[in-house]
Structures are given as structure tokens and as C-alpha cells.
Image: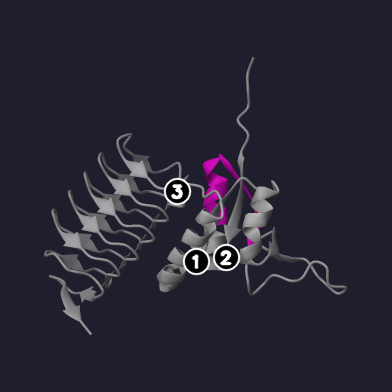
Amino acid sequence: MVTTRKATRLAILGAGDLGRQLAHHARATGGFTPTCFYDDTLATDPDAPDARRTEVDGLPVVGPLARSTEDAHAGRFDAALLGIGYRHLAARERLFDELEVEGLPFATLVHPSCIVDPAARIGPGSVLYPGCIVDAGVTLEPNVLLNLGCVVAHDSTIGAHSFLAPGVQLAGCVEVGRRSFLGIGTVVIDHVRLGDDLRTGGGAVVVADDPGDSLLVGVPARRVG
């Protein structure tokens, strides 16, 4: 007998640019069916006499973010992803932690064009955009996003709630702290340790450790601001 695997019904928290991208890439995986958005600014009261159903890219916006846990427990969807971008990493962390404690199940989304070694570990809520390569021994902590074409070499760790912009390349044994954002085309050489809340400018080449809470730009990268 042939059995068909049921696609995961996916809710996306945030209906902005990032949320729309997540819905697009989720459809490409074949394992997810995006069903709805939750958004604090677009949601309307469904019980109001003049309520109108808001839609984004064909998906309904069914309520504010706080309603998502209740709907998950009621069986409206199977798992969720956060569509809150790199400009709001502290808020992204806070919301993820609050909803996880309340029992909201978070998905892990890996585009089928990615190459992920079986020995890599990818935390819940994480997303890998098309063309990413994740090597053996890599750890992506919860709620990490790798944008288009990122390469993370062996035994590296990316801290929770961090974002890597398109084309970021990390050599082996790199550590990136929590809530960090590495700008487009950033390169980090091997055995470098970067602390929490780090930012890099586009094209930065990081060749030395940094304690974090800083902006690094240039070749080689230096602190600014």
C-alpha cells in the first residue's frame, strides 16, 4: 500500500516582506502548506459587524500574533514560523521565547535546493533559503535564518535568533553570537568567535574575534560607531 505524507499546515507570524517570502519558499518545499498569517497591524476583529477579511498573497490574516497559540492548540495549523526581520531581533527573540513557552510548535524550513550534511543540527524555527550549504558538525540554534546562498563550514555555530544575509560565508569552527546580523557577502575566517548582538556591513571580512554589541565594516573588518 502506498501512503501519502500529509503536508504540514504552516502559519506565519508577520505578513510583511519576510512573512511573504517564507510563504513562498514553504510552498517550494513540498512538505508545507501555508495556511494563514497573524499580524498585529493588519488583523481585524472577526466579530465586528463591519469586519472584512484581510488577505496577503492569497492567504488570510486571521488575527494578531497573540492569538496564534490559541489557534494552534485548537488545531487550526500544525507549526509556525516568525516573519519578523533582522531590524527587530530583540523583539523576535522575545516573541519566540514567549510563544514557545506557551506551547506553540515551530517549524524548520529547509529549501530543497540546500545541501545540509546529516551531521548538522538545525534548531526549531530556523529557515534556510535556496542555495545554502551547511557542513558537518554545524549547529544552527533556534530561530536562525540563512538567506540566499549562505555557506557555513564545518563545526561552526550560529547563535539563536541570528540572521545571515545573502552570500555570507563562514569558514570552519566559527562561532556567531545570539541576535547577530551578518550583512550581505560577509566573510568570516576560521576559528573566529563573535559575541552577541554583532552587526557587519556588506562585504566585511572578519579576521579576528569580537565581543559583540558592535558594527564591523571593511576589509579587514574594523569596529565603527
Q: CA distance from mark 1 to mark 3?
A: 15 Å
Q: Which of the two residues, 108 or 4, is positioned nearer the viewer here?
A: 108
Residue 127 x/y as whole percent:
44, 52
The residue under label 3 is 124
Residue 102 x/y as whole percent:
56, 55
The residue under label 1 is 84
Query: As shown in the figure, which amino acid type bears the numbered disc 2?
Result: Gly
Against 36, residue 84 (above or below) is below
Q: Which of the two residues, 153 or 104, is positioned nearer the viewer here?
A: 104
Query: Is residue 48 toward the left or the right of residue 152 in the image?
Result: right
The residue at the point 35 percent across, 65 percent down is: 179
The residue under label 2 is 14
Front disc: 1 or 3: 3
Q: Which of the two residues, 60 or 88, is positioned nearer the viewer here?
A: 88
> At numbered mark 1, what does the secondary structure look like: helix, strand or loop?
loop
Query: As shown in the figure, which amino acid type bears the numbered disc 3?
Result: Pro
Q: Earlier in the sequence, mark 1 or mark 2?
A: 2
Instruction: Residue 90: say if magenta.
Output: no
Query: As shown in the figure, which amino acid type bears the numbered disc 1?
Result: Ile
Q: Which residues are magenta?
A: 22-38
Q: CA distance from mark 1 to mark 2?
A: 6 Å
Quadrant in which the N terminus appears: top right
User: Do the residues bearing badges 1 and 2 touch, measured as CB atoms within 8 Å?
Assistant: yes
Q: CA distance from mark 2 to mark 3?
A: 17 Å
Against 218, residue 99 (above or below) is above
> Crowding near pointer 3: few (<14 within 10 Å), some, many (20+)?
many
The residue at the point 51 percent across, 55 percent down is: 101
The quadrant where residue 191 appears: bottom left
